Amino acid sequence: MSLLLVFGTRPQIIKSVPVIRECLTRGLNLTTVNTGQHYDFEMSKVFIEQLSLPDPHFSLGVGSGSHAQQTAKIMTKIEKLVVELRPSVCVVPGDTNSAIGTALGAVKAKIPVAHLEAGLRSREEFMPEEINRRLIDHCSQVLFAPTKNAVTNLSSEGIERNKIFLTGDTMYDLFLSESSKILNAKLPEVPIKKGKYLVMTLHREQNTSTPETLREILSAIKEFGATTVFPIHPRTKNVLRKSGLLKATNHIENLILIDPLPYHSMMRLIKDSEFVITDSGGIQKEAFMAATPCLTLRESTEWVETIKLGANVLVSSVDCRSVVRVMKYLSSNRKNIIHRINRSGQPYGNGKAAKKVVDILQNRYSLPSHAQPG
Ligand code: UD1
């Protein structure tokens, strides 16, 4: 009668925290596994420490590799582990290679899979995460959808309605529960003034696989001229270094490169900024939660609510002129956008998604509590 939860990347840890905390409060028999897809301290361990999670019971140490290599390694190791542990259910958060590897490894060993953050679709056929989430949703026994739109997506693909649960988003749970720590978090020691700087994050394959796209984005930052803090993902840093562009960033006076930040500092940096530029899924949503406008460097997004509510603008052709045009739009309409976000209903639930998730799992798989729910 046990629950297995597997993560391996930065966003998966963040999504899992409220669920892990809820399981611990109830005294459930929970085993956690870190695949090790992310291994740098600031991409992984820092979140476990800062958000006071117990160390994972198992670390698989898979590291980097091609999509097939990474997925296959995870699948093989998870299969071995679940055959040994025989958990009642395996919880899989998000859409990374760790998630698809885990889901396939578990379900093929006849362990039920519960997908946390099910039903998201960007409709980009060759986007690695889109492939992963479609496959995970179709091999899961329980699907936790964060939004109504996600429920509609799952139903329209023929997934049985009795497998789908509208829970809200666990990232919103975390954002609310950490709000006072976010307000008081340490900001990076760089020259910025509240509301007068931008935050940028970039790591998607479509933006980082060629230096040309990165060059266009950097030109846009230079032309717009606002101070831009850029916590840089190791993948992006590698591409910039290899292409010689990393040195060129020294000549963009308004660009400040820093290492990836821990959760609270990153949320405060976003909250205090003029607007955010990103290609991350999680950051688009976190900007919305922090009532900060967002420019997304992608053709489409799975977080359609942020677009419908006018909080987020997509830039599909990532060239300098198009990016600068949207930057100017966000800068001049910032107040209106923030007003709109503050007046909109919250599409990501009420901060109790993890409670719903654990209620459903406990009920469905008869998981005994060793403590009263808090
Ligand atoms: C992965 C996820 C993506 C998620 C992102 C969050 C997949 C397909 N993609 O993308 O959905 O939004 O994590 O960051 O699973 N690297 C390091 N140190 C690390 C981790 C990565 O140096 O700790 C470098 C390596 O060169 C590696 C590259 O970054 O090859 C890419 O890492 P990987 O985990 O494959 O993909 P992400 O871009 O991080």
Image: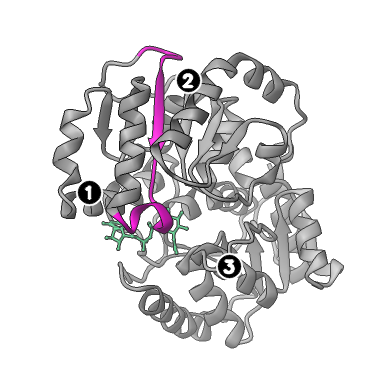
Q: Secondary structure at mark 1?
A: helix
Return the residue at label 1: 240
Q: Amino acid at mark 1?
A: Leu
Residue 172 within the magenta-colored segment of the rendering: no
The residue positioned 64% from the left and 69% from the top of the image is 134
Quadrant hosting ligand 1: bottom left
Q: Amino acid at mark 2?
A: Glu
Q: Amino acid at mark 3?
A: Glu
The Cα–Cα distance between marks 1 and 2, rounded to whole angstroms, is 26 Å
Q: Secondary structure at mark 2?
A: loop
The residue positioned 63% from the left and 52% from the top of the image is 302
- The mark nearer the N terminus, 2 or 3, is 3
Q: Which mark is residue 274?
A: 2
Return the residue at label 3: 125
Where's the C terminus, which quadrant? top right
Whether residue 81 sits left or right of residue 253 in the image: it is right
Q: Is residue 362 above or below residue 324?
A: below
Query: What segment carries the magenta color?
Result: 193-210
The residue positioned 75% from the left and 27% from the top of the image is 344
The Cα–Cα distance between marks 1 and 3, rounded to whole angstroms, is 27 Å
Colour pattern of the rendering: one colour
Q: Residues within 10 Å of mark 3 (few under 14, many from 20)?
A: few
Nearer to us: label 2 or label 3? 3
Instruction: Mark 2 and mark 3 in contact? Answer it, CB < 8 Å.
Output: no
133 or 83, which is in the foreground?
Answer: 133
Q: Position of residue 86 (x, y in %)?
A: 57, 81
- The mark nearer the N terminus, 1 or 2, is 1
Q: Is residue 357 above or below residue 131?
A: above
Nearer to us: label 1 or label 2? 1
Q: Position of residue 49 (x, y in %)?
A: 37, 44
